[in-house]
Amino acid sequence: MPWLALALIPAVWLGAVFQTTVAPAMAIRQVSPDGLALLASLVLLLLPADRRALWLATGVGFVADLISPGPLGAATLAFFLAAMVVGALQTKLASQAVAVRLLITAGFASLAAISIALAYSLAGESSLGFGPMVCRVLGVGLYTSVLSYPLYLALSWWPTPVFAPSSS
């Protein structure tokens, strides 16, 4: 596990760089993909469903908090709650199929985005109504899922499991 945490540091940095530079340029009608939500869902899907994966995904949410201008703690809590839901679903679904991974990624990104949007609304920092907010949240989930498709295809072609559970 220590090697994974070290490997996750540059991945989170790249996700944060993507989130702050590339994702806004890729926006379609003010809907942009969430690179850090993609990274957190990838961690949840590739690691065994246990507390370590939950805390790593929550840590990615903390980084999302640090780079966002909104209320501090909103993304951390949103990623934690979304990781809890995905962890519960992961035990019930066979998450090796690419389509299932895409649905889980879309769900994770949508749950995280709606939680963050609700926190912004409660803090008085959002002027969107409920309808446009839901449309943007679903758009973020769909857009993030579409961007994750090539990544999941590449991982499905890999000859051995990428992160097999260790025997230690």
Image: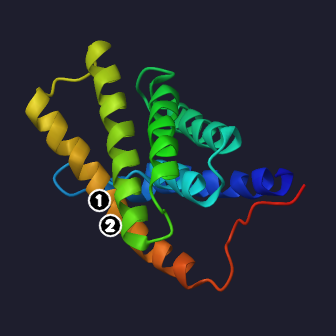
Of residues 81 and 28, the one nearer the viewer is 81
Residue at point 65%, 86% (across, down): 159
Residue 46 horizontal side relative to residue 99, left or right:
right
Q: Quadrant of the C terminus?
A: bottom right
- Does 154 appear above or below 89? below
Q: Name the mark on residue 163.
A: none
- Does 58 appear above or below 2? above
In this figure, which colouring scheme has been used for the structure? Answer: rainbow
Residue 9 placement (x, y as % from top left): 71, 51
Query: SS for tag 1?
Result: helix
Residue 31 placement (x, y as % from top left): 24, 50
The tally of labels here is 2
Q: Which residue is mark 2?
A: 146
Q: Which residue is mark 1?
A: 143
Of residues 23 and 114, the one nearer the viewer is 114
Mark 1 residue type:
Tyr
Q: CA distance from mark 1 to mark 2?
A: 5 Å
Whether residues under marks 1 and 2 lie with C-beta atoms below 8 angstroms apart, the answer is yes
Circle 1 residues within 10 Å: few <14, some 14–19, many ≥20: many
Q: Is residue 31 visible?
A: no
Residue at point 55%, 32% (across, down): 66
Residue at point 34%, 58% (across, down): 103
Query: SS for tag 2?
Result: helix
Residue 2 horizontal side relative to residue 56, left or right:
right
Furthest residue toward front: 92
Q: Is residue 49 visible?
A: yes
Residue 32 placement (x, y as % from top left): 30, 53
